[in-house]
Image: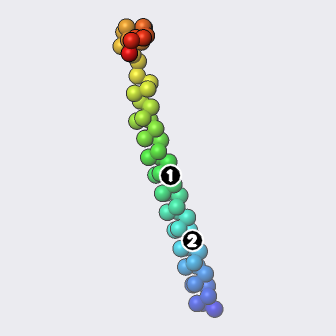
Amino acid sequence: MDTDLASSLMTARTAQTHQSVQLAVFKKSHEMQTQLLDMLLQPAQATLPPGQGMQVDKTA
């Protein structure tokens, strides 16, 4: 009886640890993706220098 209880508790603790690790990996993955998007979008949000983008060069 004690062995079954100990086994059940150990199984529950292992499952809880497994879920905690999965959640931590998911959060870190999301954080890294967010940082990558911010890094990639940063140049797109930069303002153009004065005079740039005013005319279209049709010879290009």
Image coordinates for residue 41, horizontal then vertical, percent:
44, 31
Which quadrant does the C terminus fall into?
A: top left
Residue 9: horizontal and vertical position, in percent?
58, 79
Q: Callout 1, which amino acid?
A: Lys
- Mark 2, residues whose alpha carbon is within 10 Å: few (<14), some, or many (≥20)? few
Question: Relative to 23, does residue 18 appear above or below in the rendering?
Answer: below
Q: Which percent across, then down, holds residue 10?
A: 55, 79
How would you rate the neighbour count of disc 1 (Cα within 10 Å): few for under 14, some for 14-19, many for 20 or more? few
Question: Is 17 left or right of 51, judged from the image as shown?
Answer: right
In the rendered view, would you say 12 is above or below 28? below
Which residue occupies the foreground of this view, 6 or 32? 32
* Residue picked out by circle 1: 27
Residue at (60% x, 90% y) in the render: 2
Q: Amino acid at mark 2?
A: Ala
**Alpha carbon of mark 1 to alpha carbon of mark 2: how far?**
18 Å
Q: Give the quadrant of the N terminus.
A: bottom right
Q: What residue lies at 61% left-to-right and 81% top-to-bottom? A: 8
Residue position marked by numbered label 2 in the rendering: 15
For marks 1 and 2, the one nearer the N-term is 2
Image label count = 2
Residue 9 image label: none
